Amino acid sequence: MTATWTGVTNPTRIENVKPAKGVKIKTVLPLWLLMIGVAVASAGNYPAPDRGDYTIRDFHFQDGETLSEVHMHYLTLGQPERDAHGVVRNAVLILHGTTGSSAQFLRPEFADELYGKGQPLDGTRYYLIIPDNLGHGQSSKPSDGLRARFPKYGYRDMIAAQYRLLTEGLRVNHLRLVMGTSMGGMHTWLWGELHPKFMDALMPLASLPTQISGRNRVWRRVIIDGIRDAPDWRHGDYQTQPSGLRIAAEMLYFMGENPVMRVKESPTLKQTDEALDRYVAYAMTNLDANDVLYAFAASEDYDPGPDLKKIQAPLLAINSADDLINPPELRVLEHDIKQVKHGQAIVIPYSDRTVGHGSHTKAVLWKKYLVRLLKETERK
């Protein structure tokens, strides 16, 4: 493997095997509900995804709590390929964002750009693993029954669950690539630190390698406090979704896109109110307040900064200039990437094609960089 990248791209310019026991496989992919609407898996030119569920036994959380079982739901595309030593060489782990699920990576703007024959993550060449993370989707989460008695999990707990899914459930002992969007991007930084020899390359999108602070912490606190302090939250034992979930939905809507795009979509007061009301109505029907609360609180243990030098695999971080959650003017990415031995950072410039924070799922914006990363880290 070669690794030739160090430093920052344009530092003064914003550029701009068979499943293991306990795994159940189903081949019928249903419709998926996403946080921003209903998405149908595109009939793209790539292998049909398989669905699976793996049960992790005796899961210990960082704070000392335990669960006898943690269920991890996931999608896979393709098949694992092993070398002469039994090491899996083609597995790619793809990680979703806060309150998301594996479903977002079947949206046409992602899957149709990446999974087809000859595309960067060709499903006939790579073994793509896309989990619903702990607390999300169809994996174990508060709304399954424990509600606010569900153990408080952090990002390191989520990565521990991902690792056990891979190694125990799918018998994957090496990753060609770890990549993720938003929260999944933050997990990618931590994967590089916690398991530095487990992957050939890392690509975090829409994230920063630093503790949550400033505006990023404030808007998360608004969501957490809005739910937890609502009089109808009832310590998590509500019968109908509490009013605080509405506050959470409004904040999610507020932070999700760039201001120019919002005005183009809703140029009048009436249209803006209608768009926001539609989003909130969807959220109140399809999200759960405890799940949302836990998902945002999970970021409180995120702080990869002190251990960035532990990352050994080549890492390419990609953000967009119009991301309100990770604004480039903070210069965090530009500064901290220098601590990564084989690190490189790119900030995609604002344009009429970028969509704010959600640019992370619009693969046409950044897939050429993914191609370059895979080429540069290819085993010789």
Image (tube, grey):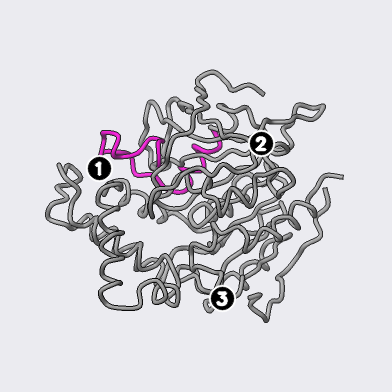
Q: Report crowding for label 3: few under 14, some 14 to 19, many 20 or more residues within 10 A (C-alpha).
A: some
Mark 1 vs mark 3: in front: 3
What residue do we see at 54% from left, 56% from top? 361
SS under mark 2:
strand
Q: Residue furthest top?
A: 21
Please tell me whether residue 148 belongs to the stretch shown in magenta.
yes
> Reading the chain from its start, which is encountered first: label 2 or label 1?
2
Label drawn at residue 245: none
Mark-to-mark CA distance, 2 and 3: 33 Å
Q: CA distance from mark 1 to mark 3?
A: 40 Å
Pick whichever, 230 or 61, lies toward us: 230
At a point 27% along the width and 77% down the height, the residue shown is 269
The x, y position of residue 42, in whole percent, is: 54, 44
* Dot 2 alpha-carbon crowd within 10 angstroms: few under 14, some 14 to 19, many 20 or more: many
Instruction: Report helix, strand or loop for mark 3.
Output: loop
Splitting the image into 4 quarters, where does residue 278 fall?
Answer: bottom left
Q: Earlier in the sequence, mark 2 or mark 3?
A: 2
Residue 194: x percent and y percent? 59, 46
- Residue 127, labelled with which disc? 2
Stretch in magenta: 137-164
Quarter of the image for residue 332 reads bottom right
- Residue wearing tag 3: 350
- The CA span between labels 2 and 1 is 36 Å
| Three-letter code for the amino acid on which mark 3 is drawn | Tyr
Tag 1 residue: 148
Classify residue 13 as left or right of residue 40: right
- For image coordinates 65% across by 42% down, the residue present is 45
Q: Position of residue 23 (x, y in %)?
A: 51, 23
The residue depicted at 50 percent of the width and 35 percent of the height is: 74
Left or right of 66 on screen, residue 24: right
Among numbered discs 1 and 3, the one appearing first in the sequence:
1
Residue 281 at x, y percent in the picture: 25, 55
